[in-house]
Image (cartoon, helix red, strand yellow):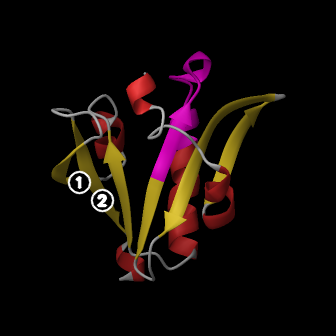
């Protein structure tokens, strides 16, 4: 886990430069995402995490639907995400396509580069 610390840290700079949203269940943060607008056409989903206690309750899907609405409303044409292999099926189920593989900060470990297109904004 220590090897991933930098990759998995939400920095104070992200709160300034990105849109950060959390999903609350009562007084508990059940999940969150970080969305970054790279340019007029493309946004990056830097994080989408659900607390293990809340997995398989539809929270990830609700967060992703919020991401999609934000992208469509913001005239974004492409949403990009780097997905861990354990999350590929989730993103594929929600319409993403794998467009390539990228080596992670851990040598020999690869992440799926995935995109979702919003034809209404193209």
Within-10-Å neighbours for mark 2: few <14, some 14–19, many 20+? many
Q: Residues within 10 Å of mark 1 (few under 14, many from 20)?
A: some
Q: Earlier in the sequence, mark 1 or mark 2?
A: 1
Q: Please say if the residues under marks 1 and 2 sit with CB atoms less than 8 Å apart.
A: yes
Residue 79 figure quarter: bottom left
- How many circles with numbers are drawn on the protein? 2
With 109 as the anchor, is 79 left or right in this view? right
Give me the residue at 44% from left, 41% from top: 7
Q: Residue furthest right?
A: 27
| Tag 1 residue | 97
Residue tagged 2 = 115
- Give percent across and percent down for residue 42: 40, 73
Residue sitting nearer the eye, 90 or 10: 10
Q: CA distance from mark 1 to mark 2?
A: 5 Å
Q: Residue at x 35, y 83 (%)?
A: 122
Image coordinates of residue 32 in percent, x first then y, are 61, 41
Examine the structure image and report whether residue 48 is included in the region drawn in magenta. Answer: yes
Q: Is residue 43 above or below residue 56?
A: below
* SS at circle 1: strand
Front-most of residues 47 and 76? 47
What x and y, as percent, mark residue 85? Answer: 26, 32
Residue 63: x percent and y percent?
57, 45
Q: Which residues are magenta?
A: 46-62
**Residue at position x 53%, y 52% in the image:** 65
Name the residue: 27% across, 41% down. Answer: 104
Q: Quadrant of residue 74?
A: bottom right
Q: Report whether 10 appears left or right of 15.
A: left
């Amino acid at each position: 886990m220590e090897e991933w610390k930098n990759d998995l840290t939400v920095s104070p700079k992200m709160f300034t430069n990105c849109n950060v949203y959390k999903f609350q269940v009562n007084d508990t943060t059940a999940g969150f995402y970080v969305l970054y607008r790279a340019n007029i056409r493309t946004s990056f989903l830097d994080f989408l995490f659900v607390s293990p206690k809340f997995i398989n309750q539809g929270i990830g899907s609700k967060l992703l639907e919020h991401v999609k609405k934000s992208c469509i409303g913001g005239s974004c044409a492409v949403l990009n995400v780097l997905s861990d292999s354990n999350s590929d099926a989730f993103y594929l189920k929600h319409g993403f396509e794998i467009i390539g593989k990228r080596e992670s900060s851990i040598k020999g470990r690869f992440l799926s580069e995935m995109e979702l297109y919003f034809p209404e904004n193209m």
